[in-house]
């Protein structure tokens, strides 16, 4: 792949323009793809699109097998605000999971075509089970009782998230305080029982969740010190167990995607230092690998608290014509683009 696309190939009459927030690491067979490449490669492998010869990873065109179908012109625009401005000025046609919730909701209320589809990424609150405080299950149960997740879903997330099936919440501040009192963390005047370090990244949704957590735990006299970190440092600290608790996501393309990396003893992404003989036996005995299959153990042990699952959000320009059934996002990929046409 060589230089940027010549301007005369950026033909709005025959191309759908899609803005993405980072380039794929490769579109070449045989190389290990990153997250963005995995989203794009199904168009090449399964829908038989080809990559324009003079593309770069920052600006490239996928050519459809049917010449009557529109080309797919991908452009990397890293800044969220810039993507919004380009969409508003009708210089792009598709935004897929690349806009903040507030901006997506703004465009939806302004009359833009916004399509929501069920997704499988799960936001969670993870605990360091080596922490002298959070190793106590009663403390983790108290935190679960103190966070009003159903209220957040209704009031804070604009309908873009849903409850995690099988993990219900019922806020109980009285019960949370009682759990902490009985665990030996008694209240004294207006002072906090203890302070916990909460790691997050500077992404807006992560920062906002951190503040929601801090405000909720203040009601049960737990102080939260929010520590925002760039992703590389964030995961470095997770791998070193240099934290008390944190917010992150379990990325899944479907409900049957294995999550053993997070929960099996010694799992690569088991940041919680969690080890459960019961869970390991289940895995060996019946091959339980999905989040849904192991939720009973997680509800009991609480190495993390699943908060909500994310819907996919697709913003479409007026130029785009969708199938009669609308936009169907069947997985975490751009496969659905092959069903779109230009008006």
Image (cartoon, rainbow, N blue to C red):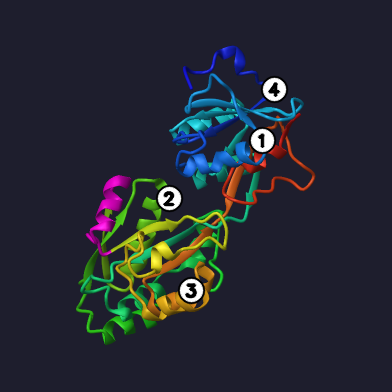
> Mark 4 and 2 residues: CB-CB less than 8 Å, in contact?
no
Q: Quadrant of the C terminus?
A: top right
Magenta region includes residue 88:
no
**Residue assigned mark 4:** 14
Mark 2: secondary structure:
helix
Mark 1: secondary structure:
loop
Task: Determine whether 26 is above or below 194 in the image.
Answer: above
Real-space CA distance between mark 2 and mark 1, rounded to the nearest whole angstrom: 35 Å
Measured from the top left, where is residue 251 in percent x and y? 47, 55
Mark 4: secondary structure:
loop
Real-space CA distance between mark 4 and mark 1, rounded to the nearest whole angstrom: 18 Å
Depth-wise, is mark 1 or mark 3 nearer the camera? 1
Q: Foreground: 186 or 227?
A: 227
Q: Earlier in the sequence, mark 2 or mark 1?
A: 1
> Mark 4 and 3 residues: CB-CB less than 8 Å, in contact?
no
Q: Earlier in the sequence, mark 4 or mark 2?
A: 4
**Residue assigned mark 3:** 294
Real-space CA distance between mark 1 and mark 3, rounded to the nearest whole angstrom: 37 Å
Q: Earlier in the sequence, mark 1 or mark 3?
A: 1
Q: Which label is found at residue 22?
A: none
Left or right: where does residue 65 sit relative to residue 284?
Answer: right
Real-space CA distance between mark 3 and mark 2, rounded to the nearest whole angstrom: 27 Å
> Mark 4 and 1 residues: CB-CB less than 8 Å, in contact?
no
**Residue assigned mark 2:** 205
Left or right: where does residue 32 sit relative to residue 6?
Answer: left
Q: Earlier in the sequence, mark 4 or mark 1?
A: 4
Instruction: Look at 47% across and 17% down and name the residue there.
Output: 3
**Magenta stretch in the rendered image:** 228-244
């Amino acid at each position: 792949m060589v230089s940027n696309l010549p301007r005369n190939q950026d033909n709005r009459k025959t191309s759908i323009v899609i803005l993405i927030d980072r380039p794929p690491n490769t579109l070449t067979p045989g190389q290990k793809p990153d997250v963005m490449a995995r989203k794009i490669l199904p168009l090449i492998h399964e829908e038989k699109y080809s990559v324009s010869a003079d593309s770069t990873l920052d600006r490239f065109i996928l050519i459809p097998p049917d010449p009557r179908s529109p080309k797919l012109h991908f452009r990397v625009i890293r800044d969220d605000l810039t993507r919004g401005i380009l969409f508003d000025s009708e210089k792009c046609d598709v935004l897929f999971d690349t806009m903040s919730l507030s901006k997506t909701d703004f465009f939806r209320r302004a009359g833009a075509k916004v399509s929501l589809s069920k997704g499988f990424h799960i936001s969670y609150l993870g605990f360091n089970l080596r922490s002298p405080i959070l190793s106590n299950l009663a403390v983790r149960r108290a935190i679960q009782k103190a966070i009003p997740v159903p209220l957040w879903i209704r009031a804070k997330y604009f309908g873009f998230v849903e409850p995690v099936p099988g993990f219900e919440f019922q806020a109980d501040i009285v019960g949370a305080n009682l759990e902490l009192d009985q665990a030996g963390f008694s209240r004294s005047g207006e002072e906090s029982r203890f302070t916990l370090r909460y790691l997050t990244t500077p992404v807006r949704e992560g920062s906002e969740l951190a503040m929601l957590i801090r405000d909720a735990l203040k009601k049960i006299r737990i102080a939260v010190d929010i520590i925002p970190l760039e992703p590389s440092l964030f995961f470095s600290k997770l791998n070193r167990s240099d934290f008390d608790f944190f917010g992150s996501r379990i990325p899944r393309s479907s409900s049957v995607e294995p999550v053993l990396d997070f929960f099996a003893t010694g799992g690569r992404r088991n940041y919680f230092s969690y080890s459960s003989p019961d869970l390991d036996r289940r895995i060996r005995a019946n091959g339980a690998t999905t989040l849904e299959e192991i939720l009973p153990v997680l509800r009991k042990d609480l190495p993390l608290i699943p908060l909500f699952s994310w819907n996919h959000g697709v913003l479409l320009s007026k130029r785009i014509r969708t199938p009669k059934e609308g936009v169907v996002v069947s997985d975490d990929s751009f496969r659905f683009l092959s069903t779109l046409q230009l008006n």
